[in-house]
Structure formats: structure tokens, C-alpha cells
Amino acid sequence: MKRKVSRLVPREDEGIRLEHFLRKRMHLTKNEISRAKFFREGICVNGDRRKVSTCLESGDLVEVLLETGEEVSEKLQAFPGSLSVLYEDQDVIVVDKPSGLAVHPSGQDDIDTLANRLAAYLREKKEDSVIRIMGRLDKGTSGVVLAVKNRGAAVRLERQRECGQLCKSYLAIVEGVPRPEQGRIDSPLGQEPGEKSQMCVDPEGKRAVTRYTLLKTIHVARRGMPCEMPPEGESGETDKSCALVRLELETGRTHQIRVHMASIGHPLLGDSRYGNGTIPGMERTALHAWRLHFLQPFTGEELQVEASVPVDMQVLLL
């Protein structure tokens, strides 16, 4: 899909050089400007191709072609599965991924993934492009996933992620009730020795920081869960109570939330790898990517998108 950005030259920029206007006013990178120079209609002023040394006049319309539409996801097979779209514009699409659906294919025969469904959705709309998914979720994790439709948006969103403007909040149900009610876990993570797909707290690992906030204490023993109600006549929580927590990541390491919460004695409910395994009513890890905050990559509009808590977690919160 083609992507062109444009802007009118304001009166105060009368006489400004085109290159300066592209960098300072349209916030294009040096690489984006260099790439656009080689497109036939890459950098135009009032519909005519111009050199970046051109001096602009007030009211000029500057247009820059960032992508030609020739880059498509030809190697990614489309799969026409259901897709819950939460937000979409010409640059990005945010979807609500159900638990049990992988984000990317793991082999040639794995064609029903979120990426494959996105390919089918965009091709149906005649918007075929390279699909860039920003931040993956584990197969068992539900919630918001951001996908980018063009290179320019991807560059800007990556920049937002690095400076904390693009951020995601998670909801999880954990075993026990964290104390204090708010905390910051700053523990480096590394690969578990001898376990290719398992992580652990490792003093020699990569820095990892997770913030948590207790939202609600849950007593669910009556629903057949491994949590106990306080003894009759007593108040407060037992050690086997559960809790709903909100989590934010300062870093993005593999299994970071699951390992960090387990490391402080509060593994996620249903976590078969770092906790006590699946339980009746929660056949997956109780983790949901709830809210995504970012800026529209070209207009700067502040956007916040939420994915409703899935039924299997809602039942436990009643």
C-alpha cells in the first residue's frame, strides 16, 4: 500500500529550504528523505518533483512518498479467520487476539495465526502490505496487538516504544495477594540452563523491570479453584487467596511478567511453566493485554485502545 505524507508551508516558513522543512516540520528521518529521492514522485512541491535545495513559499503543498506499494507480504499465506479490530487507520491496525492463537507462524504448515489472518483481512480490503507486528504475545495470552502497515509508521512507533510513549498495560490473576499493593520488580532475566524456551531470574541476564498494582482480592474456592476462603468468623485474606493485578513493563523480555511474578511468590493462575499448572475454569495462563497507549505515527494524535477482559477471566472476577 502506498503511503504519502503532505503538509502546507505556513507563512512563518516562507523561504525555508525544502530539506529543512522535511526534517524540522514534517519530522522525516534522513533515511526516509534519501529513499524518497529515488521515487519518481518521491518529493514534490505543488505536484512537481523538486530537489531538497528548493526554497519554499508560503502556501506551498509539500508531498513525500514514503512507500510505493510494491512491498507486499507475498510469502505470508492469507488465512480467512475471524479478526476483532479495535482500531484502524491508514498506518496502523489494533486487534484483540484471543488466547490460543499464535501471533506468527512457527513453520510452513502453521497458517492459522494472527499474522495470517491480518494478511487475509488487508488483502480483502486491497491494502496488501508488509505486516509488521509490534510486540508479540504468547499463544495463551489474550488482548491488544498492534500491527503496522508501512515502514514509516514502524520507524516512528519503534521510536515511541524506546522513549515510553508506546506502552501497554496488562491484567493478570495471580496466586496470593501481593504485598505491598504496589511494587517494582527489577530483576535481570536469562535463559534457564538446559531449557531453550524457559526463562529465569539471572544476575548475569538482561535487565528487566515490571511494575504491578493490586486491583482486587479474589476468593474463589467455591468455584473449584485452588484458593481458600478465610475461616468462618475471620476477616482478611489467607495465603491461598488470589488477586487481580495491573502490570506495566519498563522492558520487554520473554515471559517477563510470568517469571517476575513467580519470583516474588505470586505466579499467574493457570501457568503450567512457572506456576502450579492449569486449573478448572482457567485452561491457560491468566494474562490479558488490556490497554495500549500510543501516538498516531504521523499526526501525533494520542490514542488509547482497550480490549475487554475475556470471559474465562471475567468468571473468576465475579
Image: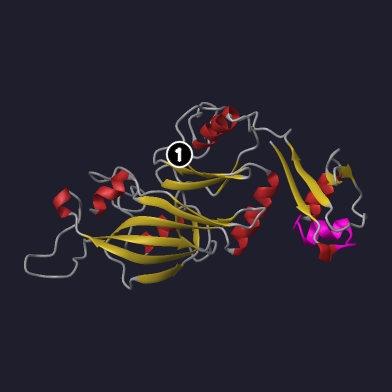
Along the line of sight, which residue is nearer the eye, 160 or 19? Answer: 19
Residue 305: image x %, image y %? Answer: 48, 52
**Quadrant housing the N terminus:** top right
Along the line of sight, which residue is nearer the eye, 274 or 11? Answer: 11
* Residue located farthest toward the left when viewing the structure as drawn: 233
The residue that label 1 is drawn on is 84
Q: Residue at x 67, y 43 (%)?
A: 150
Q: Residue at x 31, y 58 (%)?
A: 174
Relative horizontal placement of residue 255, taking residue 128 as reference (left or right): left
Q: Residue at x 78, y 54 (%)?
A: 8
For residue 250: magenta? Answer: no
The kind of residue tagged 1 is Ser
Residue 238, placed above or below residue 287 = below
Relative horizontal placement of residue 18, taking residue 264 as reference (left or right): right
Residue 213: image x %, image y %? Answer: 37, 66
Visual colour scheme: secondary structure
Residue 265, placed above or below residue 141 = below
Report if residue 126 is visible in the image: yes
Report if residue 137 is visible in the image: no
Residue 82: image x %, image y %? Answer: 45, 32
Relative horizontal placement of residue 308, taking residue 168 as reference (left or right): left
Circle 1 crowding by C-alpha within 10 Å: few under 14, some 14–19, many from 20: few
Magenta residues, start to end: 14-28
